[in-house]
Amino acid sequence: MLTFPKVKIPVLVIWLVSECFVNNAMATNATADVIFSLAVTAPVCRVANSKSTVQLPPASNPDLTLKDYLGSNGISIAGVNAVNRVTSPSLQVTTTVSCSSPATIMRILVAPAAGSDLWNSNWLAAQRLVDSSTPAVPFFAGLTMLEYEQVSVNGISKPWSYSDYAGNLSPYTQAFLADNQSGPDYIVNVTWRPTFYNGVPSAKVGKPVGGAFTGTARVTIDY
């Protein structure tokens, strides 16, 4: 009669597996979390103009025509929007954008300030200078207007008209950096100027109540 030896391996395996499950069931977890944080400080920018008031050349008398006024004062350079628009380097203003840290300027616009006497309701980028009477009387019988154009950014020629051919607002949207450090700030300089519409050269400047025709332009940046 053949006798086979007893095999105990399966019993041992079962016992080992059982031991593992018993040990896991008895385990206790302890945890501790770590938070990772990356702070980002957004730049704060402000705008300042080289001139708070631009004194346009004075007119010698109320009957001075637009043609003679522009010609006698050297306002004869064709504007970026060259159709009947003229300007002069003497009218230029430099706007300095100062930021607390390097910043990307995404958009800049020079346009009539709120409450300006617009050329008409559809020409939001063009304004007339007016006197202090009520209702206000515009210069050159309302037959000319001021629009605004960009000359340069940080001394590099970047011509741009802030008004399109239909008088719509046309901001400059080619991004540039305010990254030139000056003291604690990072700056960029934008030079711009007004243009005159000279389509009616015979228009007379007129006699303003209060002694002057005035208007306000506003510089707006997005960053």
Image (cartoon, grey):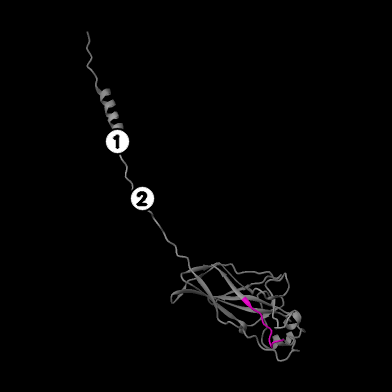
Identified by mark 1, the residue type is Met
Reply above or below: 100 against 144: above
Callout 1: helix, strand or loop? Answer: loop
| Residue drawn at (45%, 65%) of the image | 41
Identified by mark 2, the residue type is Asp
- Residue 168's spot in the image, x, y percent? 68, 69
- Residue 22's spot in the image, x, y percent? 29, 32
Q: Quadrant of residue 135?
A: bottom right
- Quadrant containing the N terminus is top left
Callout 2: helix, strand or loop? Answer: loop
Q: Which residue matches tag 1?
A: 26
Question: Furthest-front residue in view?
Answer: 134
Label 1 packing within 10 angstroms: few (<14), some (14-19), many (20+) = few
Span colored in magenta: 209-217
Question: Furthest-right residue in view?
Answer: 202
Say which mark, if any, is on residue 203.
none
- Residue 184's spot in the image, x, y percent? 43, 75
Reply above or below: 133 against 119: below
Asked if residue 198 lies in the magenta stretch, the reply is: no
Label 2 packing within 10 angstroms: few (<14), some (14-19), many (20+) = few
- Residue 59's spot in the image, x, y percent? 70, 89
Reply above or below: 4 against 22: above
Q: Quadrant of residue 13?
A: top left
Q: Which residue matches tag 2?
A: 33
